[in-house]
Image: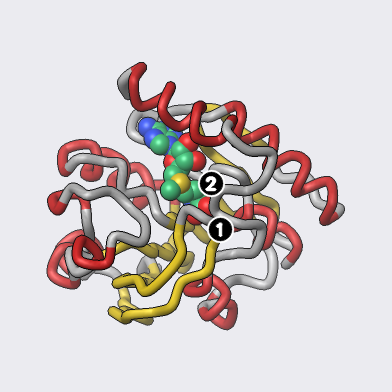
Amino acid sequence: MSTADFDRWQTRFSATDGYVFGEAPNHFLVACADLLPAAGRALAVADGEGRNGVWLATRGLAVVSLDFSPVAQAKARRLAARHGVAPEFIEADVHVWDYPEAAFDAVVEVFTQFSAPPQRAQKWAGMRRAVKPGGVLIVQGYTPRQLAHGTGGPRVEANLYTEPMLRDAFGDWVIERLVEEEVEMSEGEGHAGLSAVIGLVARKPG
Ligand SMILES: C[S@@+](CC[C@H](N)C(=O)[O-])C[C@H]1O[C@@H](n2cnc3c(N)ncnc32)[C@H](O)[C@@H]1O
């Protein structure tokens, strides 16, 4: 993690009292509700202002919400309190966090494409390790087609996700859903307008 990246996110979240990515959960995550466990532990990776972690907690899961921005996590705590849930908040760099082995029934990564390819490999290795056998990994990210839309996400093609990339990283698990789509996104001012996204649900064998 560079200091510049950290400062940029802190500044972005400090610029408003509102929720840059909205308070409602990501649309793909909600669409995958039928594949989520009814109970157990969930990890929300780079959960920011907490919309996804809080939603998972309202479904009865014990959630760990991981992010490096204390400003975002302060907002996430307020969101959680409003919903009457209490995720555990961990302030850490998702690339180097010590992901516990087989600790979570669900690991969720929504819009974390700040990772360059070598960092992405570290992060995904940790996420894979953290899922329990039989648990699910849910990923939502932008595809390279998003560069033409400019409605959110990084403008760095190497950081964006493709179907071959996801199959290469998670194809040894059971792919339960892999959806590439263009959607009218309304997830805060940060993700607004026609968007090219891909979503994956992979289940760890065992
Ligand atoms: C685009 S936002 C998405 C937040 C959340 N997943 C959502 O969908 O609303 C990216 C998040 O990644 C966090 N972040 C960026 N780099 C990080 C890093 N190296 N370690 C931990 N969090 C990071 C930022 O603080 C921000 O909350």
Tag 1: residue type?
A: Gly
For this view, does 185 lie left or right of residue 123? Answer: right
In space, the residues marked 2 and 1 are separated at their CA atoms by 14 Å
For this view, does 156 lie left or right of residue 173? Answer: left
- Residue beneath the point at 51% across and 27% down: 10
Q: Which mark is residue 67?
A: none
Image position, residue 59 (x, y; %): 72, 67
In the image, 119 versus 37, the foreground residue is: 119
Q: Judging from the image, what secondary structure is the residue with disc 1 in?
A: loop
- Residue beneath the point at 47% across and 53% down: 190
Q: Earlier in the sequence, mark 2 or mark 1?
A: 2
Colour mapping:
secondary structure
Crowd class of label 2 (few under 14; some 14 to 19; many from 20; radius 10 Å): many
On whether ligand 1 comes within 8 Å of the CB at mark 1, the answer is yes
Q: Which mark is residue 47?
A: 2
Q: Quadrant of the C terminus?
A: bottom left
On whether ligand 1 comes within 8 Å of the CB at mark 2, the answer is yes
Crowd class of label 1 (few under 14; some 14 to 19; many from 20; radius 10 Å): some
- Residue beneath the point at 28% across and 48% down: 154
Q: Quadrant of residue 73?
A: top right
In the picture of the structure, the residue carrying the numbered disc 1 is 188
In the image, 158 versus 185, the foreground residue is: 185
Residue 99 seen from this side: no
Q: Judging from the image, what secondary structure is the residue with disc 2 in?
A: loop
